[in-house]
Amino acid sequence: MAKNHKRATRDGKGFRILLALLSGGLLSAAWPTWGLAPLVFLGFVPLLLLEDRIAQGEKGRLFWLSFLSFFVWNVVTTWWVWNATPAATLAWILNALFMTIVFNVFHQTKKKVCNKPWGNFFLIPYWMAFELLTYHWSVKWPWLNLGNVFSTCHSWIQWYEVTGVAGGTLWVLLVNILITNVILFAKAKAAKYTFINIGASTMVLIFPILIGKSIYRHYEDQGTDTEVIVVQQNCDPWNEQFDAHFYDQVIQNNLALSLPLVTEKTRFVVSSESAIQEGIWLHETDKVRALRTLHDYIQKHPQMAFVIGGTTYEWVPKGMEDDFPARQVGNSDRYYYCHNSALLIDTINMQHRNKSQLTPAVEAIPEWMGFLKNYSITMGIARGTLKTDPEAYTMRFGKHLVGVPICYESAFGEYVSNFCKKGADLLFVITNDGWWGDTPGYRQHFEFSKLRAIENRRCVARSANTGRSGFINQRGDVLQQTHYWVPDAIRETLKANTKVTFYAKHGDYLSRIAVYLTLVLLISWMAMSIIRWNQAGEKPVKKANKKKKK
């Protein structure tokens, strides 16, 4: 008997590990760009079945099993981060840990409040609240937010113009939970509820696709024709772009690639993030050779403006030396700010905006890690924390207002929508994806621009130093794209649209609703815990009273 019990325990443990690995594998296999997106509708099913087994009393350490699922998902989908920094290991562990904590809080709430299949719906507000947090806390990492998975099936999710990516997350979780409940009710031989969940899961799965396909067929780009050129200069960020010997060459590459495509109708030439590394002090831009070269180029073509990325500096005002991003000049009493900036150069002046959503560890060190303030966890080029703009600023040229998300910012839906809310009629994403090499990283990053185009109904011109540059219309269709590690320039006529979508007006409202529901669930969990604790404490007291009466 003892041997059989040990064997059953071993077999059960192996099955639990298999379920955990299956969830991690399905979520990974669904992810862009080589994945099959529909698999995401099954990704949480094995993990939810595992959670139910443990909630019903089966032995098992849900915390470590769920951590295994999420760790597999993080590593398989974002392994390429290692190419930029060894801190990738810490990112995988931390993000998997945060997901694990969320899943286990859901588990404890379900056990206390409703330990039945219907309790699985508690996962929705918890997970959506967590995804909102990934946009706003110091360790920002929204890369694996569930709604991102449909960028490769963009005709399905045209309703993102109303819900944003959070609508996709809600969709994924609903289908996963309904399919899980079908299995649980079928196992319990509850035929009525089994058929209810089969019908509901079928409707919830198919109906959004039909709506999306219908919108996709009938939507046409809106706005005025605007000719834009995108340049992919193709400098190696490890060996060329940040080497002073190549500063002039980078600018000359941009001019040589774009010039053959310029026409009288050209309104913008868009180049990549951090293309100008000469060092731009904002109080003396006239001394920067690269800016003078670009200004001379624009004087010959006054009908257009040049949008390009650069590193800019400014002195810290007196009394602000304790500001966390402030950097000391040697051992002097002078401090300065460093920015990752987008520049718009026309015949009159230079406008700029500074990146607000910084890449963790690369451009931003959390203030609670102040001992690393003057160091970089990655690359050996950047150090400390960059100074950011407090909000998304647009830049004007002629009749156009343009929003220019810089690199990582294109992963933040509500942030990008703020450009459109302020009147931007075109979006120019400038980025440097060369750090990751020829990996899924730059391809996944390109996919995010398709989501931003749909959410805001804005055409997107995307310039990458290398990786993938291109044009995307308001339906999320890729009109043109370049190849990896090939210097190139492409031209397209885009529609400049000024209409503001429901999502652009209201942002991540679904996620904010989820936060309120999460608070309700947490209060319910605590209340039920207190009630059950009190009930458990009352029972021995009653027995003692009975003995006294006897």
Image (tube, rainbow, N blue to C red):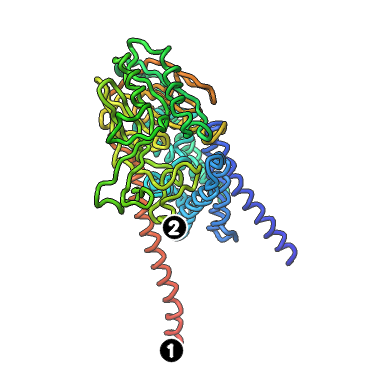
Residue nearest the viewer, comparing 350 with 515: 350
- From where the camera sits, is residue 438 visible? yes
Q: Nearer the viewer, mark 1 or mark 2?
A: 2
Question: Mark 1 Cα within 10 Å, few/some/many (few <14, many 20+)?
Answer: few
The residue depicted at 55 percent of the width and 52 percent of the height is: 66
Residue nearest the viewer, comparing 132 with 209: 132
Q: Position of residue 15 (x, y in %)?
A: 65, 52
- Say left or right for 79 vs 150: right
The residue depicted at 35 percent of the width and 25 percent of the height is: 307
User: Taking 354 as reference, is 289 above or below it?
Assistant: above
The residue depicted at 35 percent of the width and 31 percent of the height is: 342
The residue type indicated by label 1 comes to Lys
Q: Secondary structure at mark 2?
A: helix
Q: Residue furthest top?
A: 264
Q: Quadrant of residue 171?
A: top left
Q: Position of residue 317 (x, y in %)?
A: 25, 47
Which quadrant is the C terminus positioned in? bottom left
Residue nearest the viewer, comparing 159 with 439: 439
Q: Which residue is mark 2?
A: 109
For residue 548, the mark is 1
Q: Are marks 1 and 2 in contact (CB under 8 Å)?
A: no
Q: Position of residue 7 (x, y in %)?
A: 72, 60
Q: Secondary structure at mark 1?
A: helix
Q: Quadrant of residue 228?
A: top left
The residue type indicated by label 2 comes to Thr
Which quadrant is the N terminus positioned in? bottom right
For residue 316, the mark is none
